[in-house]
Image (cartoon, rainbow, N blue to C red):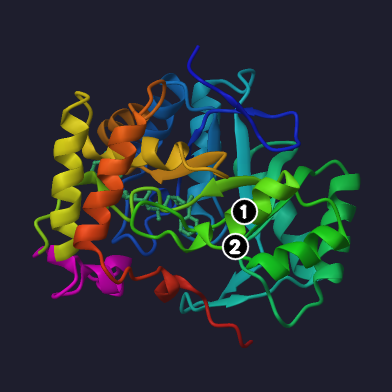
Amino acid sequence: MSEKVRFGKTDLQASPLILGTWVTGGWAWGGSDEREALQAIIRSLELGINFIDTAPVYGFGKSEQIVGKALDEWGRDKEVIVATKCGLQWDAKERIRRNADPARIMEEVDASLKRLGVERIDLYQVHWPDPAVPFEETMNALLKVRDQGKIRYIGVSNFDRDQLREMMKAGDTVSLQPPFNMFERDAERELLPFCIENGVATLAYGGLCRGLLTGKFKGTEQFPKGDLRRADPKFKPGQFPKYAAAAGEIKKLAESYGKTCAQFALRWAVQQPGITCVIAGARTARQAEDNAGALDWTIKPEDMQKAEDILARHIREPLGPEFMAPPKER
Ligand code: NAP
């Protein structure tokens, strides 16, 4: 059996690598192939990943549906930790807005249960903080659906330290899902120390920095319409070659272990203080296989330092993932 970690204060034993299923839904990733996406999930489960992260907004229900189908195929009797989210709403034009109103949550949880085909969601996360709704109201709704047995644990995503503290005061919040990878490390300043101090589990998202950390890019590639990387400042001329060059050096370091760049980058994140699990998306079974190679090995301290040196040399002024945030105003 491959490695597992205790997920914060919960009784969940999680693989430190989580399969992310944003790309599975196709939306914001230039589309997806359903059969391929399903196989990526099955392959991840076969290789020791026992945790899947999804959200209603990923393909407007499609990602959750495909996760549900994959669980049917995999066998419902085998335990898989399923995390999904609430608090975002979309319209017919696929415009996203935040909505963590109790009424919205009540409606969303039932829709997610149905699409996933599960009786209970293991981890239910508020996707983005909604400034229009007092956190206490959102929490009361979450506690209600937990009492009804529809969800097991409550988590949040994209909350800053003060927002997380406030949510924890309102009710039992076990986890935080922040952006975090070799190139996006803002969480190190306040969030991760706070989570360590308070026993909050963390699921780092964007583990491969949207593919940059696979080392597959030259820094000149263009992305199809509808691919979020067109809006990501790291993939723009001037920045993209710098990030690609850094990944190229990390790739060489990874090769000294017989590992790929993706495996090294994900392992690096797993080994960071305050990180419980790292989430990586996979479009295909092949990508899933590559990423699963982040399990069951360790990067030596001297090579963690070499990685730091590479990052410091190439990325002097790191850019964050702020471009992804949905508008705050309703
Ligand atoms: P990611 O894991 O950094 O990158 C995933 C993408 O990289 C894939 O879709 C694939 O895209 C490429 N890729 C993955 N493995 C590869 C491999 N081995 N070789 C080559 N290419 C590979 O990005 P992410 O999916 O945005 O983040 C991971 C997960 O975190 C999401 O799926 C989601 O569950 C979660 N997330 C949460 C939030 C939030 O607000 N809470 C935000 C973002 C993500 P291509 O094949 O198109 O290159």
How far is disc 2 from disc 1 in space, using C-alphas?
6 Å
Q: Which mark is residue 117?
A: none
Q: Which mark is residue 193?
A: 1
Q: Position of residue 166 (x, y in %)?
A: 79, 67
Tell whether 327 sits left or right of 321. Answer: right
Q: Residue at 66%, 35% (x, y): give it.
A: 7
Q: Few, some or many C-alpha atoms within 10 Å of disc 2 (few <14, some 14-19, many ≥20)?
A: few
Q: Amino acid at mark 1?
A: Pro
Q: Is residue 284 visible?
A: no
Q: Is residue 66 visible?
A: yes
Query: Which segment is the magenta one?
Result: 220-241
Q: Few, some or many C-alpha atoms within 10 Å of disc 1 (few <14, some 14-19, many ≥20)?
A: some
Tell whether 213 sits left or right of 78. Answer: left
Is mark 2 in CB contact (under 8 Å) with mark 1? yes
Q: Quadrant of residue 134?
A: bottom right
Q: Main secondary structure of the magenta part?
A: loop
Single out the residue that lies furthest toward the top.
Answer: 1
Q: Position of residue 110 (x, y in %)?
A: 74, 52
- Residue that label 2 marks: 190
Q: Residue at 12%, 64% (x, y): give it.
A: 241
Above or below 24: residue 14: above
- Looking at the rendered structure, the secondary structure element under dot 1 is helix
Tell whether 113 sits left or right of 205. Answer: right
Q: Amino acid at mark 2?
A: Glu
